Image (cartoon, rainbow, N blue to C red):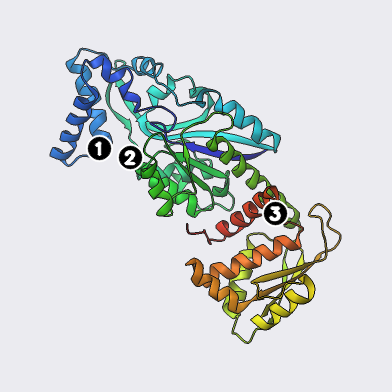
Amino acid sequence: MKKIAILYDFDKTLSTTDMQEYDFIKNLGISNSEFWGQTSRLTIDNDADKILAYMYMMVKFCKEKNIKLTHEYLNECGKSVVLLPGVEDWFIRINQFAFSLGYEIEHYIISSGIVEIVEGTKIFKYFKKVFGCSFIYENEVAVWPKTSVNYTQKTQYLFRIAKGSLDITDDDTVNKKVSKFKIDYKNMIYIGDGITDVPCMKLIKEKGGNSIAVYRNKKDIVKTLVNDDRVNIVCEADYREGSMLFDAIKLIIGNIASYDKLKEKEEKAIKLMIGEYNESGYNVRQYEKIIRNVFKTIGGKKTFNIIFVDKNEIQRINKEYRKIDKVTDVISFALIDDPEVVQTNELGDIFICVERAKEQAKEYGHSEGREFAFLAVHGYLHLCGYDHQSPDEEKVMFGIQENILNKAGYVRKK
């Protein structure tokens, strides 16, 4: 069965606040502000890593309060963690939806929190692997950090998941070049709550996956992540049935399935043949190269033609065949009508107006290469029988379209 990975931060992404603030700090008999305040001073005074500093303070405070900082004690602290709405039964629901489309979801945590606390939560059993901070124990008591995960270190675990190198002592596999990933980046979804997740969010988005920023009260903070092109979607941190987050991830999984279905049809052959004709009066060699590179990510044995034309010609075609007397950007003439019925290897013709494509690139603020790639893929999907006349059709077609462009490196700028 094909796999999809959903990767989560923990604090304020799955839980209502930082995991240390439920029982661990309360049992020390101090306030949250006192614990984090002393941690901050230690960090500044010693120019220390913030994560290592808070782990040091955990050990220090427990010694001062005569609390044995054991693995079992941290597990107990995890039992009091309060989860966000819908989280407890989220995994069963989303797993069932993915299974109905022929996919298995692997859930991972990548957190700067404590692994031993996560182990004590109700949802620990659902995770394939929890990457986070942990301790070395002597005589059952924590004495030193075993692993520490700060914000930029989180990204290494994306590579480990992609390559199936989940053992953190395995440096060979994670650094080795592979011909095929265990889980492709386009099949990854990262969910986090803010700035500390930016490196992972940005990397997943750039590699064709989907990043989602969730919020509880401070929507403006995560909205900047969209404006800065760091994430795909912003949602309220509500995992319940019918929530925006639940529906968004179902849509993403559906888009992944649609993309894979299209690619499977084409992968049986060795080459996708593109016939290119230039009737525009422009030098289009660079655009031909871009389009060919985009379609390398699809492959297949189908043949179709791309014809570059000027405004007068595209308007004539539009008027003659579509009864619309105006310039447009792309027109497709398909030889098939149903994406499920492939009667011939010849798909049809795509007419691209060079002048209109250049104008639109300026209007949308992206490169001409991205615009020509978009128009070619859009026309190609029409040749394959896809359309966007209804909202449901649009979701499917545009989802496949974005997946193809993202994988080719033409990520849409918000």
Say few, some or many: other residues with alpha carbon within 10 Å of mark 1 (under 14 / 14 to 19 / 20 or more). some
Residue 15 sits above or below residue 197 on the image: above
Three-letter amino acid code at disc 2? Asn
Q: What element carries label 3?
A: helix
- The spot of residue 184 in percent (x, y) is 57, 47
- In this view, the residue farthest toward the right is 343
Q: Mark 1 points at which residue?
A: 50
Q: Where does label 2 land, which residue?
A: 150
Q: What residue occupies the far left of the structure in this picture?
A: 45
Residue 263 image label: 3
**Cα–Cα gap, marks 3 and 1:** 45 Å
Amino acid type at mark 3? Lys
Disc 3 to disc 2, C-alpha distance: 37 Å
- Please tell me which residue lies in front, 233 or 220: 220
Residue at 43% of width from left, 22% of height from top? 119
- Residues 365 and 93: in front is 365
Residue at the image point whose x is 39% and y is 46% from the top: 198
Q: Where is residue 56 in the image (x, y as percent from the top left)?
A: 23, 28
Crowding near the residue tagged with mark 3, few <14, some 14–19, many ≥20 C-alpha atoms within 10 Å: some
Q: Which amino acid does label 1 sit on?
A: Lys
What kind of element bears circle 1? helix
Task: Identify the residue at horizontal 71%, vertical 70% (top origin).
Answer: 331
Viewer-side residue, 318 vs 74 = 318
In the image: residue 51, left or right of residue 158: left
Mark 2 in CB contact with mark 1 (< 8 angstroms): yes
Q: What x and y, as percent, mark residue 345?
A: 82, 64
| Circle 2 residues within 10 Å: few <14, some 14–19, many ≥20 | some
